Amino acid sequence: MRIILVRHADAEDYAGSDFQRKLTPKGRKQSKKVSKFLSSIADLGKALLIYSPYLRAAQTAEIIMENSAIYYTAIEDERLGCGMTPEEALDVVKEVSFEDTVLLVGHQPDLGEFMAYLLGTSAAALNVRKASVAIFEIDGLRPGGGRLEAFIPAKYL
């Protein structure tokens, strides 16, 4: 199984609530770059995309799907909202019957904590910048069960 983690792209600093923060023009460009990068992965013809219900993550997921050559099945999951624990992320992945690739679009520090969990490191969290992509091959859905294949910050996409 492959898990791809994407932090939402650049969003406005303020809105009526944290839940309502929209992507900035820079964030829209970043999301398109993420989509182009993901489309370049030779063996990635389809993926299950699960995203946070926060507007900035949902918009990031939408732009990724709209600008991609990949076939995505998309699911919004409230557990990917701000405050997700590594165990909750694992539960989300365990519940799907998709065996190939699962793409999660979420937030920091949650994704950084999930990365540390998959790697089995003692770090509380790894720093994941906006619109960064981390690709894991999963040997087992447990702490230390992941192998980091790539970690690409948005500025290098």
Image (cartoon, rainbow, N blue to C red):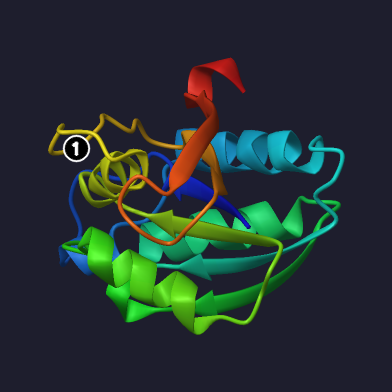
Q: Would you say 81 lies left or right of 37 here?
A: left
Q: If the image is split into quadrants, where does the C terminus sit? A: top right
Q: Is residue 85 left or right of residue 102?
A: left
Say what secondary structure mark 1 lies in. loop
Q: Residue at x 23, y 34 (%)?
A: 121
Q: Is residue 9 visible?
A: yes
**Is residue 36 positioned above or below 80 on the image?**
above
Residue type, mark 1 in image: Ala
| 150 up-or-down from 117: above or below | above
Residue 53 occupies quadrant:
bottom left
The image shows residue 59 at horizontal and vertical percentages of 50, 60
Q: Position of residue 4 (x, y in %)?
A: 55, 48
Hey, which quadrant is residue 22 in on the image? bottom left
Residue 72 x %, y %? 73, 67
Residue placed under numbered mark 1 in the picture? 125
x 59%, y 66%: residue: 49
